[in-house]
Image (cartoon, coloured by chain):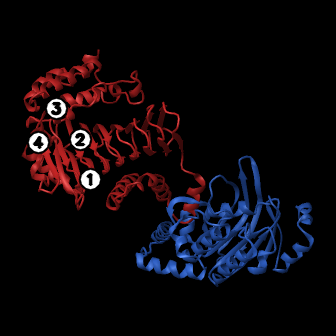
Chain colours: A blue, B red
Amino acid sequence: MTALLEVKNLQVRVEDREILHGLSLTVNPGEVHAIMGPNGSGKSTLSHVIAGKPGYEVTGGEILFKGEDLLEMSPDERAAKGVFLAFQYPVEIPGVATMNFLRSALNAQRKARGESEFSTPDFLKKVREVAKSLSIPQDMLKRGVNVGFSGGEKKRNEILQMALFEPSLCILDEMDSGLDIDALRIAADGVNALRSPDRAMVVITHYQRLLNYIVPDFVHVMSRGKVVKSGGKELALELEESGYAQFEDAA
Amino acid sequence: MNVALAKTDTGRALSDAFAAARERLPAAGRVADLRQQALDAYERTGLPHRRIEDWKYTDLRVLIREVLPLAPAPDAAALKRAEAALKAAAIEGTRRLVLVDGAFAPDLSDIDAEKGLSIRPLREALDGGDSALQVQLFALDNANPMVALNSAMLTDGVVIEIADGAVLSQPLHIVHIAAGAAASSIFTRSLLRLGKNAAATLVESYVAADAAMKYQAHDSLVIAIGDNSRLDHVRLVEDAAEAVNISSSVVSLGAHAHFNTFGLTSGAAVSRYQATIAFAGENSRVETNGVNLLKGRQHADTTLLMDHAVPHCASREVFRAVLDDSAHSVFQGRIIVRPDAQKTDAKMMTRALLLSDDAEADNKPELEIFADDVTCGHGATSGALDDSLLFYLRARGLPEKEAQALLIQAFVGEAIESIANDALRDLATSAAERWLRTRS
C-alpha cells in the first residue's frame, strides 16, 4: 500500500535559519496523527511546507503525497489533489462573500481534477447541509470571508471548508488556539465527523487538551526541527505529566 | 513652439483644420464668436504639458503629441459598423442615444416621446437660435485648454431637458461610438438639464466599432440638477486600446439635490476625465466614485474639483485603481470649501493596488478650506495584494490568477457598491470582470 503522506528527511530553511533538520513522518489513510512539541519546534513550519506556503526553502529531503512529489506542486494543485490545511489564524477577506469564495474554490478544485462543476442549486444544498451539521448560521455565509467572525466561528468555517472539499489529508494547525471549551468541543465534533478510512488527519497542537476530543492513533513529539519520539495516544498523557523539557535536552 | 505642437500630423495648424471644418460646425447666432474665443484660448497654450500644474502627471505633449484631424461625418459603412458595435454596448431597459464619430445617429437612437422629457441633437439645439441655451452650452471655462479645444471644435451631442416633477421611466444611455477607420478626432458636447423635483439616470459608454483603432474622443458634458432632484450617473470608458479619451464635465446642483456618479475606465491608451462639481444650493449631496483598471502602458487620469460654495452640503469621493504591467493612474482631487460653506462634510479616499513593480499611481489630494465649522478629510494608500490572503485562497484550490481576481474584485467592489441602481451596478461589475478575464 502506498502511504498517503511520506515526509522523508525534510530540511527546511527560512531566510538563513534552518528550521527543520531532517524530519520524517509517514501517514496512512484512515490514521490520525498528533504532532506535539514546544513553541518554535517547527510544527507550524511543517504544516506550511506541506500546504506550499511561499517563503520556505526546502534544502533536503522530500514529501510524497499518494506517491507523487508534493514539493513540485503549487498550493492550488496540492489542494485539488486532496491536501487541506486548517489555518491556525484564518485570514479575513473583506469584500469576498463566503458563498462566492466557497463555490469558486470548490469548482476550481473540481475543474483541476477534470470533474464537472457543481450547479448552483446542488452547491447551495451541499453547503446548507454541511453548515447545519456544524451549527453555522446562514447569515455567516453571506458575510465576507471570516470578516467579523469570532475565533470559534473562524475555526468552524475552516471545518466547513474541510467538509465541503472532502480532502484526503487534513492538517489542523493549532486548532485549539483561542477557543474556549465549548467552541473547542463543537470544532472537535466537526472534525471527528469527518474521520473515515480513506482520510487521514495530522493534528498539530501544543496542548494535550485537544487530544481528549480528537483522539489520535499516533503521537509524535517534535523538538528543534525533528521528530524525537513517536508512540500511541498514551504518549500525549505522558507529556502532560513530564513536559517537553526532557526532549529539549535530548535534541 | 506651442503653435507647432498644436499642428496635426498632416502639418496643418489646428486653426486650418478649424477653418476647413467650419462648415460642419454649427455656428448660429453667437456660436461662431464663442467658438473663435475658445480656439484663441486653446492656441495660447496648445496641448497642456507637465509644466502646467494641473497636467503635471498627464503631459499630453508626450502622451498624445498632437490633436488628430476632425473625423468625417459617418458614411453608411461607418454607421453599419456602429450598429454592430452597439449590439455589444447596448443595455437592456435603457433609452439609447447614439453618437457615431461625433454625429447624432437618429436611426440608432430611441427618441420616442416621453412626458417631461425633451431630447434634441446638439446641432439642432444650437441652430435653433435659443441664445440662453447657446450661452449655457459655452459657459465652460476656456482656461482649461482641453475644454477650450472642445468648445472650438464640437460638432454634435445631445441636449436633454427633463421637466419639473418628471421621473424618467428608464435610464438614458448615451453611447459614444468611434467607427471611422482613419485616425481622427471626435468632438462632442452634451447637456442634461434636470428640473425641480425630478429624477433621472444617465449612463455614458465609450466604445469602438471594428475598424476604429487610433482615434481621439474629446467629449464634454454639462449637467444642471434642479432643487430636490436626483441624478444617478455611470460612465464606462471602454475605448479601443490605442485610443485617447479626454472628457470634461461641469455639474451644478441646486438645493436638496443629490448626484451619485460612478466612472470605470478600462479602455483607451490615454484618458483623462476632469470633472467640476459645484454646490449652488444648500443641503445637497454628491457621491463620486471611480475605478481605473489598467494594464500594458495605459495612462488614466481622473481630476476632480468639488466646489462647496454654500453651507450644509456633503460630498464623498471613493477611488480605486488596479494597475498591472507599466500602467499609470493619476488621481487629483481638490475640495474647495468657500467661506460661506459652513457645516460642509467632505471626504475623499483613494487607494491604488499595484500588481507590478513597474506600475505607477499618483494621488494628489488638495483641500482648500476657508470656512471654520466643517468636517473634511482625505486619505490615500497604495500597495500590492496581501500575500497572506493570496496564500489562503490558493491553499483552498484557487489558481493564482483566480485568487488575484477575487481579491481585485473585492478591492474595486467598495467603489462599485455605491451605484444605486441594481442593473447598473451589475453592469459595472461585469465591466470589471471583462477586464479581469483579459489578464488570465
Picture coordinates of residue A178, whole percent (x, y): 73, 66
Say which residue label 3 marks: B70
* Residue B52: quadrant of the picture: top left
* Distance in Å between CA atoms under marks 2 and 4: 15 Å
| Residue denoted by label 1 | B198
Badge 1 density bin: few <14, some 14–19, many ≥20, Cα 10 Å = many
Q: Amino acid at mark 2?
A: Met
What separation in Å lies between label 3 and label 4 (alpha carbons)? 12 Å
Q: Which is more N-terminal, label 4 or label 2? A: 4
Q: Earlier in the sequence, mark 3 or mark 2?
A: 3
User: Disc 4 marks which amino acid?
Assistant: Pro
Per the rendering, the mark at residue A128 is none
Q: Nearer the viewer, residue A92 or B262?
A: B262
* Residue B122, image x, y percentages: 14, 40
Of badges 2 and 1, the one in the foreground is: 1
Q: Helix, strand or loop at disc 2?
A: loop
Q: In this figure, what is the number of numbered marks? A: 4
Residue to which mark 2 is pinned: B213
